[in-house]
Amino acid sequence: MFAELRSADTREYLNHVKSPDILDLGNGLLRPQFELLRNAGYRVYGIDLINHPKQSAKSFLYTIARYLYNRRLFNPIGGAKGGLVCGDVTKLPFRNESFDLITTVAALEHFLNIPEVVRELARVLRPGGVVWAMIHLFSCPSGGHNVTLTQFPLRKMPPRVDAWDHLRLRKLPFTVPLNEWRRDQYLQSFAERLEYRNNIVLFVKGAEFVSPGF
């Protein structure tokens, strides 16, 4: 679904770029956006600190998951050149003006120094290039990224846990790094370095958990 949204938003731009270079920021262990872009024939690089050669039972299971995921793609052989890079998103190991499109899905909320990340995005983006970002906002009911709130969309809270627990009582611990930024903070940071085009709210969650009268 997110890939379809990204494609719709960037198709017209990419159609005018010959052999675009794409960066998938925070590609994740499953690497869905990286794999979809690569199998579409684009030259794409994925960067994440988890892209290291270390082997473990978890990495082996994700290898199997990626194999099964790739079998469902139209072109499971792979696309143009590119690759995975293990690196720090606040110090991107790429030259200035390296990419035509930078995409990131549900990753920015885990970066603790957003201004430095945005500075690096502006540095490696080519003139006229596009940054397409989907952010899981901290202020939504599942913004604490707790594994017990993995319904999509969220329909039921765990027993004895308040809605927006991460904004109030914090009975459920955080299991991943979170910068706790709100939408306006992201928009301001991007506007300081890049030409701001548009933002949309894809999903509004939690209305059923709000007290009557609010």
Image (spheres, grey):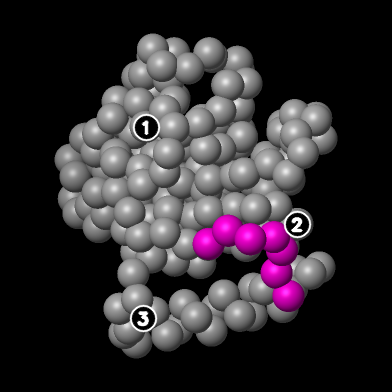
Instruction: Based on the picture, tell me whether residue 110 belongs to the magenta stretch.
Output: no
Q: Which mark is residue 40?
A: 2
Q: Which mark is residue 29?
A: none
Q: Estimate the spatial distance between the alpha carbons at disc 3 and disc 2, rounded to whole Å.
A: 28 Å
Residue 122 vs residue 112, the one in the foreground: 122
Magenta: main secondary structure: loop
Q: Are marks 3 and 1 in contact (CB under 8 Å)?
A: no
Q: Residues within 10 Å of mark 1 (few under 14, many from 20)?
A: some
Q: Position of residue 102 (x, y in %)?
A: 55, 38
Residue that badge 3 annotates: 58
**In the image, residue 69 above or below residue 193:** below
Residue segment shown in magenta = 77-83
Which amino acid type corresponds to the residue marked 3 in the rendered image?
Lys
Label 3 residue SS: helix
Q: In which quadrant of the rendered view does residue 185 lie?
A: top left
**In the image, residue 51 above or below residue 10:** below
Residue 159 visible within the image: no
Q: Residues within 10 Å of mark 2 (few under 14, many from 20)?
A: some
Residue that badge 1 annotates: 120
Q: Position of residue 199 (x, y in %)?
A: 57, 21
